[in-house]
Amino acid sequence: MPSPDDLQVNGPDALEIVHRIGSDVVALAADDVDREARFPSEGIDALRDAGMLGALVPEHLGGLGLTYTDVAALCRALGRYCANTAMVFAMHQIQVACIVEHGQGVPHFDAVLTEIARSGTLIASATSENGIGGDVRSSICAVEQDGDQFSLIKEAIVISYGSHVRDVLVTARRNAQAAANDQVIVHVQTPTLTLEQRSDWDTLGMRGTCSVGFLLTATGSIDQILPTPYAEVSSMTMLPVSHITWASLWLGIAEHAVDKARMYVRSAARKTPGTLPPSARRLADTYASLEQIRSVIDDAVAEYERARNDLDLHTSLRFAIRMNNLKVSASQDVLAVVQSCLLIVGMAGYRNDSPYSLGRQLRDAYSAVLMVHNDRVLDHNASLLCVMKGS
């Protein structure tokens, strides 16, 4: 493991490192990760060794101190090589962001951030729950406090890569008497955390995220409860960072698909010098769509960076709606781009034994509209629009 001094790199340096890891490690394992529905250990280990799991951890706590713009670029780069590795990386960074923005300065959470930077601790999230479905703004699970200690039990529908972590951020009601939406985030960790697997993961795409269900039980000190209410953490950090990092890695998937389509058209053009193949026009149109997605994501990331220093913007309904719209539009548009690439490449993209194969990219892209279902996101926007003043 490199020393902290070796890890003080800027955004461009980090991006170069991640591209090297992507081409030398992540891409080589991607097909096997997908085929076997296994955790992308090679890629995550390489990112850990390079200090990238501490990308958002402030420098004074031993991390890289990168910006959200930088991390979005890293997710996008990883999406080109393996969507599973990119998604695990993104989900980890979302949890780190919640601690950085809402727990920094609290001794327990400063220690957590320091450990992430020092040893590359991977953090998972437990928000969904049996009995509430995908409504992460409600909890049945409650913190049971006894003096300065707590216990909790949660039947989590999904904890992505839960079998491969020792640390989880869990949502729960503040106490047994609290309303379902009066929630906090609790950091739980082994050895006082146990996860009993309750389901399997055999899916169309994103197979390497290993997003199975668990019965989670944990005990600990009340110092492990994030001081900021979950509703505030969710609206100001968890949701916008989720949408930004997810959209960025989805963009990486689309860029990889377009690269394959361009190579295919170029190969076809060489066979008929002076004459463009029929698929060339579709490629140009698809590339234009890709450029539009890039612009939307870049604008959203820039807006989030501004919002972090502007409380009025950060807490406005318009900001929340725009971040939600990013998720909806990116998930739909990226899928459309990958589908268009399949039409360009044709049977060569449909075959699994072809260098132009797009099966994995297409299956992974289909997950985008389902990760926090677009209908749920649009329902939330509808509610916000009903109370928002002006247009």
Image (cartoon, rainbow, N blue to C red):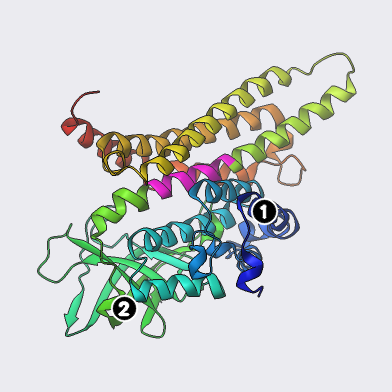
Which residue is at 42% across, 58% downward? 97
Q: Residue furthest front?
A: 60
- Counting from the top left corner in percent of width and height, residue 192 is at 36, 84
User: What residue type is disc 1 on?
Assistant: Asp
Badges 1 and 2: C-beta atoms under 8 Å apart?
Answer: no
Residue 108 occupies quadrant: bottom left
Instruction: Mark 2: give few (<14), some (14-19) or many (20+) Cα within 10 Å.
Output: some
* Mark in front: 1 vs 2: 1
- Counting from the top left corner in percent of width and height, residue 95 is at 41, 61
Q: Which numbered circle lies on residue 217? A: 2
Q: Examine the rendering and report whether any part of residue 136 can be seen.
A: no
> Dot 2 lies on which element?
strand
Which residue is at 21% across, 62% downward? 183
30 lies above or below 343: below
Q: Which numbered circle lies on residue 13? A: 1
Instruction: Please report whichever mark, 1 or 2, sits nearer to the chain's N-terminal start.
Output: 1
321 vs 84, left or right, is left
Nearest to the observer: residue 236 or residue 359: 236
Magenta part of the protein: which range? 240-251
